[in-house]
Image (cartoon, rainbow, N blue to C red):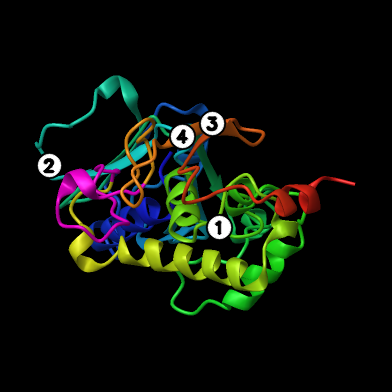
Amino acid sequence: MPEGDTIYRAARTLQLGLGGQKITRFESVLPKLSRVDYDAPLAGRTVERVEARGKWLLIYFSGDLILLTHMLMSGSWHIYRPGESWKRSAHDMRIVIETEKLIAVAFAVPVAEFHTAETLARRDRFKDLGPRLLDAEVDEAEVARRLRSRPELEVGVALMTQHLVSGIGNAYKSEVCFTCRVNPFRRVASLTDQELAALVSTSRKFLRANVTDASGDAIVTYTGMRRTTGRANPNDRLWVYRRTGEPCRKCGAPIEARKQGPDARTTFWCPTCQPMPHAATAAAAPS
């Protein structure tokens, strides 16, 4: 699933390509979008701005019309020049936004909706998004307070709960917990204030490090080159994510993996570097 940094880069790329441009053609295979385009055509409108909020991407058009999309597991936005071959099958096309210079294509996007500013403010799951770690200014103490408000959640689940903090996905969940030496299956209630603060600051550090100008404007989909280790070798770019059975880069113990949370996302961790303290387990037991 694309994470906050991927969506941020996608929004930045779309803003660079479409921002301020007039729409010459709009097409969608999604009936709800096509009906809006038929009643209030997109052609002739201007793209006012594109932005990311957590894992959501928003394209603002003139005339109070907003396209809200969520990539879930397989969606992506691409930008092409007129006549350039698409890198995904036309069968996966869901939305085309064309200007004189560029064409933006949404592939396999499962959530795509038109909104006005008023309806967007009422949209479930979007209106309650937690603080965005990629914002220029973030109150990390407030993020920690929000996470602390759900003491019964496992740490890995809490970090991915978007109404607590937005933008962290499955890869960062595992990488952040490893870096902070926190077992992802501990309950939030068992964390010390120092551990919780480290989880928040490390999450923000990793996300921001992967959206620098050098991290890639040209490619808006996840390229597999996300880094958390700081090592130059591409084979050493992640600590634990998708490394089941491989030796830990710190201690050599085999990396383990297990499904976690209501969505059964796979969590990766080192049992030696991230032990489950007995006291933490006992203190974490739901009442």
Q: Are marks 3 and 4 in contact (CB under 8 Å)?
A: yes
Q: Which residue is mark 2?
A: 82
Q: Which residue is mark 1?
A: 166
User: Rounded to the nearest whole Å, what is the CA distance between mark 1 and mark 3?
Assistant: 23 Å
Dominant secondary structure, magenta: loop
Residue 52 image position (x, y, % from top left): 44, 58
Q: Secondary structure at mark 3?
A: strand
Q: Are marks 2 and 4 in contact (CB under 8 Å)?
A: no
Q: Which residue is mark 3?
A: 258
Query: Dot 1, crowdedness within 10 Å: few (<14), some or many (≥20)?
Result: many
| Residue depth check, mark 2 versus mark 4: number of the one nearer the observer | 4
Which disc, if any, is residue 256? 4
Residue type at numbered disc 1: Ser
Which disc, if any, is residue 278? none
Residue type at numbered disc 2: Pro
Query: Dot 3, crowdedness within 10 Å: few (<14), some or many (≥20)?
Result: few
Q: Secondary structure at mark 2?
A: loop
Residue type at numbered disc 4: Glu
